[in-house]
Image (cartoon, rainbow, N blue to C red):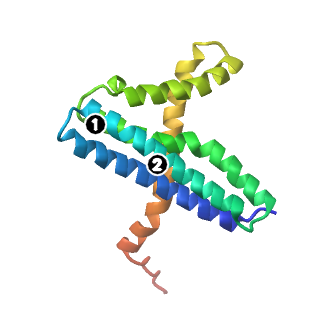
């Protein structure tokens, strides 16, 4: 038996972590970029953001494994964590990419960004080779970026939407005739 309540709770925490990683790394890069070059700021902030994000995800998974949940629930948490770890790690990267975009700079000069791209390439290239030829890797990398961004956006939306609804007030009542 799988506890959907536990999975929903963990996915909510995942969404909060995605938003936090995006915002904290973005603010960190922006603040450090006031004092040093943007690429240097990115290289200073991204490694810490990636390590912190991965550690927090690991703590959540370990907490689930140590909980009194069923084996099925624990396996589901592990599978979800494995599927969502790369989109989660993309959160700090996407903040850096967005800042570089608005600053009209190329993020590819960042050593941290390049190292992340190489690391992901080592994971995704064998998949693209198994599915097709080596030219497929460019498509796989682009698909990874889009899927990760969509997953992060949906995670953020699910976490933020209830607050937006509360700000908008209650639904209007239908008039009875």
**Residue at (49%, 35%) from the top-left corner?**
146
Corner quadrant of residue 98: top left
Badge number at residue 52: 2
The N terminus, quarter of image: bottom right
Looking at the image, which residue is at 46% across and 68% down? 162
- When asked about the image quadrant of residue 37, the answer is top left
- N-term-proximal mark, 1 vs 2: 1
- Nearest to the observer: residue 177 or residue 53: 53
Please give the name of the residue rendered at 64% of the width and 61% of the height, measured from the top-left corner. Answer: 63
Residue 163 location (% of width, % of height): 41, 69
User: Would residue 149 be found to the left or right of residue 23 on screen?
Assistant: right
| Residue carrying label 1 | 41
- Which element type, helix, strand or loop, lies under badge 1? helix
Residue 76: percent from the left, percent from the top?
73, 53
**Viewer-proximal residue, 82 or 176?**
82
Can the viewer see residue 52? yes
- In percent of width and height, residue 137 lies at 57, 19
Residue 53: x and y in percent read 48, 48
Q: Can residue 92 be spotted in the picture?
A: no
- What residue do we see at 36% from left, 72% from top? 167
Q: Residue furthest bottom?
A: 177
Residue count near mark 2 (Cα–Cα under 10 Å), binned few <14, some 14–19, many ≥20 = some
Q: Compared to 130, does 144 lie above or below?
A: below
């Amino acid at each position: 038996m799988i506890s959907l309540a536990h999975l929903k709770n963990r996915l909510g925490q995942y969404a909060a972590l995605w938003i936090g990683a995006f915002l904290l790394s973005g603010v960190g890069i922006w603040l450090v970029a006031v004092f040093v070059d943007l690429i240097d700021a990115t290289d200073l902030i991204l490694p810490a953001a990636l390590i912190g994000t991965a550690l927090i995800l690991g703590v959540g998974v370990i907490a689930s494994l140590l909980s009194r949940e069923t084996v099925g629930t624990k396996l589901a948490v592990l599978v979800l964590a494995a599927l969502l770890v790369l989109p989660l790690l993309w959160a700090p990267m996407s903040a850096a990419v967005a800042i570089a975009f608005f600053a009209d700079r190329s993020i590819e000069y960042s050593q941290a960004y390049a190292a992340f791209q190489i690391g992901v390439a080592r994971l995704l290239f064998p998949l693209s080779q198994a599915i097709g030829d080596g030219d497929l890797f460019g498509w796989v990398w682009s698909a990874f970026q889009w899927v990760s961004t969509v997953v992060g956006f949906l995670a953020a939306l699910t976490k933020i939407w209830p607050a937006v609804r509360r700000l908008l007030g209650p639904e209007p009542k239908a008039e009875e005739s």
